[in-house]
Image (cartoon, grey):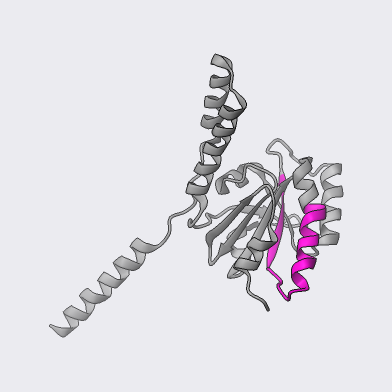
Amino acid sequence: MRGVLIKAVWLLLLFVSCQSKPEYIIRVDVEKLNTEYKAAVNAHGLTREESNAFTQRMLDEVYQSTLRKRLPPVQVIDLKGHTKNLVELLTNKTLLVFTFKGCGPGMETILDKFPKTLLELKKENITPDYLCILLQDSTETKISKSMNELITDCQKRYPGKVLLMNENEALKLNIMGSPMGIIVDNGIVQCLDVGNIHSDTLRKYFKKQ
């Protein structure tokens, strides 16, 4: 009887553990949102306020579908050309910084603002673990000259921290803007920054070493 009771308790604990495990990131249907936006524009046009409201709706959907969710398996490519699962490269707590080549705000962040943020935090003995992920257009079959130049620039700033990712893989993480920053803790998305990587956010999530 005691053995049966112990087994029942164990099964109950296992069930609760499985039930409480966060689900994977839910991919936002970007094509559907774009279709709705274009239809509204073609039908009657949109005021600035309506356009801003649509953008906010999309951002809200991204946050709801991404925050407190688990990272799914997604492929990245290291600078030696090896394909890897991003999840397997993460430490317990990692900042992922994404940018598209050719995006002005993204380039400014990755080449200027973020290096300055890291130096600022270093003075406070805060050294977040991070990866710099450069997004490739889904139509690119090989690395272009401009991408190679960007890789070289980023490698100088972030040695050993640079990876490539196809935009189709990025959409699995709801990365659809540039720059974007995601803080992942034990595989769970704890924070999502769109448009900039804020130093105050990093202070909050990464303890002093």
Q: How far across and down, in percent of the image, does residue 89 sit?
A: 63, 64
Number of numbered tags placed on the structure image: 0
Q: Left or right: where does residue 148 sit relative to residue 52? A: right
Is 158 a magenta residue?
A: no
Q: Which residues are magenta?
A: 110-135
Question: Image quadrant for the N terminus?
Answer: bottom left
Classify residue 85 as left or right of residue 148.
Answer: left
Locate residue 21: give its quadrant. bottom left
Q: Nearer the viewer, residue 205 or 88?
A: 205
> In the image, what residue occupies the spot 71% across and 39% down?
137
The residue positioned farthest toward the front in the image shown: 49
Taking 160 as reference, is 76 left or right? Answer: left
Q: Position of residue 164 (x, y in %)?
A: 72, 51
Q: Is residue 100 above or below residue 122?
A: above
Which residue lies at the image location 85% right of the left edge and 43% below the top edge?
146
Is-magenta flag for residue 121?
A: yes
Answer yes or no: is residue 101 visible: no
Q: Looking at the image, which residue sits at the far bottom?
A: 2
The structure residue drawn at horizontal position 68% and vertical position 68%, both measured from the top left corner, is 129
Residue toward you, 29 or 73? 29
Counting from the top left corner in percent of width and height, residue 206 is at: 63, 70
In the rendered image, the residue lying farthest to the top is 43
